[in-house]
């Protein structure tokens, strides 16, 4: 009697994946649930979610301004949604852990969605006279990569590629170019607009959009959000993330700095 062949080990540890998902903060969980919900809605044939919520330049008017917020959470299929969610989760989780849940909600429902959309419409419609629609949460992926690249550049200005030294702030641009070459039907312009907004955020030019901490603390205390909402990240918890102060061997001596993390007309998707 032949001995049964042992199954090959999994390329990942299911226990670690489950532990990571259980620890995801509140807003990150909500974003993933909304992405899943809109993908499920797209399975029906009565109403097209993509046509309703995609960022289509010629369709933007006072009655359709909601598209400036809906396009990042709508995708064209399972793999589009899954790969974008996979790339977005660690970046968004890190952002929320650092800035707090209320700040993340205010920024991603507001300027971190509308500014890339407005810049895209300006270039696509006014300058290029096109009407290519875009959608997908990779707009947030490239925006967060742009912000992290600026932070990394401040502590590690270059990375080596053979004999060449390449500025670290260019890494999202290189990723944008490579993705556009390797994957068809993705929006190079949409990703580029997201990266530019991410650069502005990383440089501090968008801090005017960040809600004042005094206001956030008042809201948290008034509504007892930390006590009522599981996985909520408060303003006071967010200074060094939810896991305490990370050790730093930086000799700069600057106080309060955290350790930098390296990290559709004709419809186009934002991301793979």
Image (cartoon, rainbow, N blue to C red):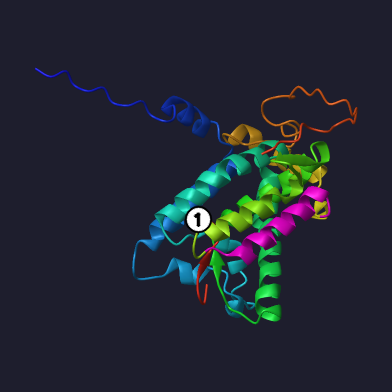
Which percent across, then down, holds residue 8?
Answer: 32, 26
Which percent across, then down, holds residue 233?
Answer: 66, 36
User: Is residue 106 positioned above or below 259 on the image?
Assistant: below
Q: Residue at x 61, y 79 (%)?
A: 130
User: Which stretch appears magenta?
Assistant: 186-205
Which percent across, then down, holds residue 124?
Answer: 65, 75
Q: Is residue 211 visible?
A: no
User: Is residue 57 positioned above or below 14 on the image?
Assistant: below
Residue 68 placement, left or right of 98: left
Residue 139 placement, left or right of 42: right
Most common SS among magenta residues: helix
Query: Few, some or many C-alpha atoms within 10 Å of disc 1 (few <14, some 14-19, many ≥20)?
Result: some
Residue 115 placement, left or right of 132: right
User: Is residue 212 positioned above or below 253 on the image?
Assistant: below
Tell which of 61 and 173 is nearer to you. Answer: 173
Q: Which residue is mark 1?
A: 272
Q: Residue at x 51, y 44 (%)?
A: 86
- The quarter of the displayed image where residue 109 is located: bottom right
Q: Which residue lies most toward the bottom here? A: 129
Tell which of 87 and 221 is nearer to you. Answer: 87
Q: Is residue 8 visible?
A: yes
Which percent across, then down, holds residue 71?
Answer: 56, 63
Q: Which residue lies most toward the right here? A: 253
């Amino acid at each position: 009697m032949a001995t049964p062949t042992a199954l090959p080990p999994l390329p990942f540890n299911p226990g670690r994946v489950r532990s990571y998902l259980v620890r995801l903060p509140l807003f990150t969980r909500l974003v993933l649930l909304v992405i899943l919900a809109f993908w499920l809605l797209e399975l029906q044939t009565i109403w097209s979610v993509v046509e309703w919520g995609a960022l289509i330049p010629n369709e933007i008017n006072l009655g359709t301004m909601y598209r400036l917020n809906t396009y990042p959470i709508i995708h064209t299929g399972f793999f589009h949604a899954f790969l974008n969610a996979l790339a977005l989760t660690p970046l968004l989780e890190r952002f929320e852990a650092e800035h707090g849940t209320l700040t993340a909600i205010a920024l991603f429902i507001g300027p971190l969605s509308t500014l890339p959309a407005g810049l895209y419409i300006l270039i696509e419609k006014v300058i290029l006279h096109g009407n290519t629609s875009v959608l997908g949460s990779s707009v947030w992926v490239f925006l967060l990569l742009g912000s992290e690249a600026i932070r990394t550049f401040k502590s590690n200005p270059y990375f080596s590629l053979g004999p060449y030294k390449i500025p670290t702030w260019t890494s999202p641009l290189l990723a944008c170019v490579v993705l556009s070459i390797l994957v068809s039907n993705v929006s190079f312009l949409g990703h580029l607009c997201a990266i530019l907004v991410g650069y502005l955020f990383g440089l501090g030019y968008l801090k005017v959009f960040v809600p004042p901490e005094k206001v956030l603390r008042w809201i948290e205390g008034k509504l007892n959000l930390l006590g009522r909402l599981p996985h909520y990240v408060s303003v006071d918890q967010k200074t060094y993330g939810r896991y305490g102060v990370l050790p730093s061997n930086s000799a700069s001596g600057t106080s309060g700095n955290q350790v930098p993390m390296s990290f559709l007309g004709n419809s186009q998707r934002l991301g793979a």
